[in-house]
Amino acid sequence: MLSIVSWNIQYGKGVDGRIDLSRIAREILIDGFPDLICLQEVSRNYPATDNGSDQVAELQKFFPEYESFFGASHDRSGGVNGGRRQFGNLVLTRHSPVQVLHHLLPSPADPKVKFMSRQTTELVIPT
């Protein structure tokens, strides 16, 4: 049986308004090491979130024994230090996947409807 943690981390921002990825990591590991960690709303080089840090790289440091796969639903130029501004999902796994796919989800057909691009990351893991 696989243990899974899924969490919309809102780029690490807690209810107290502080962005603290180490707090997120501590909470994830409080009951042990899950097989899969699925994090939504992870940012990379966005000036408005966490001073434009690379949250993917920061989170990887907290989970060195995991493989990581990031899928960006937003991927644009103009990020911090010339990097790309990315926002999406990070999956960390203790089991090597045989396949990883990233899927952009459909947007509204009406161009007048405001929406945020959405994406999902699919991992096939042998059991």
Image (tube, helix red, strand yellow):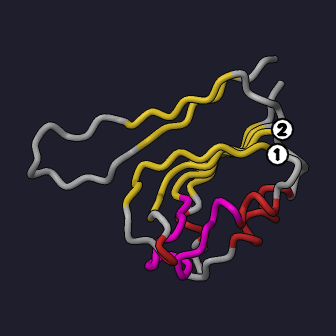
Question: Which residue is painted at 88% across and 48% down in the image?
Answer: 65
Task: Please determine whether, in this image, residue 108 is positioned above or below residue 47.
Answer: above
Task: Please identify the quadrant where the N terminus is shown.
Answer: top right
Task: Please identify the quadrant where the C terminus is shown.
Answer: top right
Q: Which residue is mark 1?
A: 66
Q: Which residues are magenta?
A: 42-57
| Whole-percent x, y for residue 69 in the image | 65, 43
Left or right of residue 94, residue 123 in this image: left
Q: Which mark is residue 94?
A: 2
| Whole-percent x, y for residue 18 in the image | 61, 82
Q: How many marks?
A: 2
Question: Which residue is painted at 74% across and 38% down in the image?
Answer: 4
Question: Which residue is painted at 82% across and 32% down in the image?
Answer: 95
Disc 2 is placed on an element classified as: loop
Left or right of residue 95, residue 38 in this image: left
Disc 1 is placed on an element classified as: loop
Question: Which residue is painted at 77% across and 63% down in the image?
Answer: 25
Question: Badge 2, how many Cα within 10 Å: few under 14, some, many 20+?
Answer: some
| Whole-percent x, y for residue 21 in the image | 70, 70
Task: Please determine whether, in this image, residue 51 is positioned above or below residue 108.
Answer: below
Left or right of residue 98, residue 18 in this image: left
